[in-house]
Image (cartoon, grey):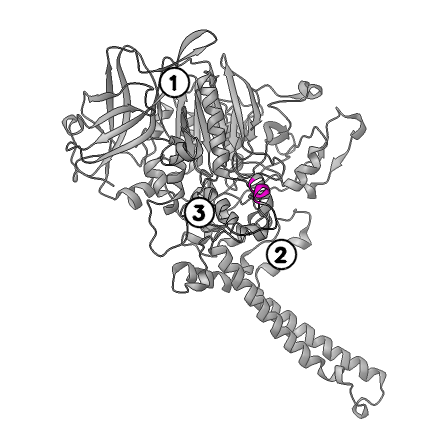
Amino acid sequence: MISDEIPLILSPNLGCPRIVELASGDVTIPLIVAGQYGDGAIPKKELFEGLFRVVPSYEGEGREANLVIHEDPLLLSDWNQLPHFEDCEDTQMLISSELHNKVLGEGTSYWKVNATMQVDDLSGFLRERELRGKSRELPTLYDLVATERSGRHRRINYHAVQLVSEINRKNCNFLHITDMHVARRNDQMLAEVLKVRNERSKKKIKQAYINFNQNLRRAIGKANDMADNGEIHFVLFTGDLVDFSFHGWEFAVNRDENNFKEFIDILVGRGHELPSWKNPGLKIALFTSTGNHDWRLYPYNPGSMGTEKTFGLTQSEVKNYPYRSYDPSDYPADRRGRLAKELAAGMIEKFNFKTFNQRDKWKLRLSKITGAIDSSNFLRILLSVIIPGVGVSSLIAQAQLDPAPFHTELTLPSRYIPVMAIVLSILVEYAARRFTNWLANYLVANPLIAEAKANHYYLTHINPYLDYAFSYGDNHFILMDTGRDLFVGDLLDGKQVKHLKRASIRDNIIGNSPDSRAFESELLYYPWSQIVWLEKVLQAKSIKNGDNVFVSLHAPPVNVPSVLYNKLESWKKIFYWLDKLLIHRPRIYHKITSWDDIRESNQDKKIKNKWISREELDLSFGTINHYVSQFFYLCMGLTEAEHRTQKSPKPNKKVAMVLCGHAHRNIEFSIELHWNDETQENDIRIFSDSYSDPPPNLSKISPDWKKRPLIIQTAACGPPGEEDSTPPYYRKVVIEGGKIKGAKVCHL
């Protein structure tokens, strides 16, 4: 990975490119490079001179140029220290401990290198296109190439630089695309299914099959059309880039063969993409962040979840695709096998099956009692004591009917009731143990098993950052990793089962919308929390009051269960408000103590004053589960202390929009502060409406984009969702004159 001859360019890269104005004179491209040159060694500019050049990403579109190093590289000695940011792009000088320790090695050092394109003649560097009768220069992608002096080895950072004629500080258009779920098997499954005879005809199977990869290719084609027409400046991809990392489970994993490589092939149009799929690759800059699937290691059974809905195949058809999976019971000596055994031993005792309302005190007490008892012990007590007691009770009842019980011959059923009850209790206990063993194996195996090594290839070939930021004029973009699934993350990071009591069965296992580990207090990959990092970025001097700030996440901070949302969708207009959202404290997920009533809009007189009970409300279904209130306050330009001490606090730099995915639906929320006279604090209220494209009769209640932070979920580009079932979806965000004009949902 690292050598003395050719340093590794961490950024810019495919998923974190640099957009650079092509002006007369010198064009500087800041590079972050990694190398191992010995302790305390500081390379001079001569060491890097002549190694780097930019090459057009697409033949015939641009000119090649060497990069010249005029000054000595800047050693990044504080690459793991959180500073006060002058510019939000300074975030790209911070390195995660995972990349440093587990991928590059502890002896690695990092430098910032200012590489210069010496451009005397500006012609030919930008691709030209005839638009509306005029010749126009369009943004043009370049690969960043590092070549060993001998010429035998080279590294390519695809689509790492986008040259533009100028950056309009007030105008910016981009696409938000999420949940691509790329995997090699998406291109292979159909052919395998068609090899055998099925009940449906081949034609019908082909028409019904849903190929997530092909959905992404279609989205790329649409983005290219918009780029060629000068309509967009870049694209944001917010997580679940791949469906899982490795193609199958093996003892020795080939880390260079994974679905992130397939993702790169599709994005840059290499390999079989052009001849087989007519996909030339994306022709506009792409910025990426990771989602929970990007942390998953191995394939899940394609027949395990709604195959007709997900892949367009029946259960019998999908069985013809031989996928490679991992079963812990087949490998008891493997770490995951041992973990499954440990998990089964105390699994149920660590779950709270429901977060109860404070008013339901008897339920809360019951949950504490049952949660403290091991499942098998509980069943043994229940079945070995209570059920035999039923048999004894029957004997007593029979004796009471006969005044001479000792002279009464017992009937056969009554005589054997105690024995039968004990046998039954043993059988049920055995079944319970078998079930918990099966469930433990299922949880540790695919599809939920996740570790950081799943995205090592991503960190070195696509984007080295889990959290970072960039600017386009007066518009600033903060991209944050929302991490692994909450439930599985606690399984595989050494904590084992002791924290499983935090997991909710309803959304993490049954609901197919697992909670996220984002914003948690434990410092796994950086020596600072994400919330502290976000606050620092929002305080960067380059972000001015009135600028547009976007935060891009994968898992949303607020979400509703799909069943409830289907119910509310038919009402045309709904809004929620949240009476009080407790501050998160370390090791405690955010909890809601009480919900205010949810009332429908008075716009519709037919359903005026109709209310939804508090028990039906759940705004944390498959969401970020840590520090949510702090995140909301930061989005509104406040710190935690400011919102508590001031009735009408003056906000600092507000977030205009939070862009999310994960839930595979198009749904929008907004948040605002409301002063609570009783508590003397500002509460958070959460609303939902069609803000990006309101119906005509609701246009009056749509918020001002600048006054209220919007939380925007975009449905998946890859798999279909429950409500939004015709992917690929994307949003086109339009900013004109510094104002957000829309974020309309589109699909192909």
Which of disc 2 and disc 3 is earlier in sequence? Answer: 3
Specify the amino acid type for callout 2.
Answer: Ser
Q: Secondary structure at mark 3?
A: loop
Give the class, few, some or many, for how many residues have Cα within 10 Å of label 1's Cα (few <14, many ≥20). many
In x, y percent, where is residue 526?
A: 36, 40
Q: Position of residue 737 (x, y in %)?
A: 49, 12
Badge 2 marks a residue whose secondary structure is helix
Q: In the visual, does 49 lie left or right of 413?
A: left
State whether the magenta stretch is mostly helix, strand or loop.
helix
Q: Amino acid at mark 3?
A: Arg
33 relative position to 375: left or right: left
Neighbor class of circle 3 (other Cα within 10 Å; few <14, some 14-19, many 20+) is many
- Magenta span: 202-206
In the foreground, 447 or 134? 134
- The quadrant in which residue 121 appears is top left
For the question of whether residue 466 can be seen, the reply is: no
Alpha-carbon span between mark 3 and mark 2 = 31 Å
Residue 235 in the magenta stretch? The answer is: no
x 38%, y 42%: residue = 455
- At x 17%, y 35%, the residue is 5
**Most distant residue in the bottom direction:** 407
Q: Mark 3 vs mark 1: give the one in front.
A: 1
Provide residue 262's location: percent of width, then percent of height. Answer: 40, 39
- Residue indicated by mark 2: 367
Q: Which residue is mark 3?
A: 296
Say whether residue 185 is left or right of residue 748.
Answer: left
> In the picture provided, is 112 more to the left or to the right than 318?
left
Disc 1 to disc 2, C-alpha distance: 59 Å
Task: Say what amino acid the circle numbered 1 marks.
Answer: Pro
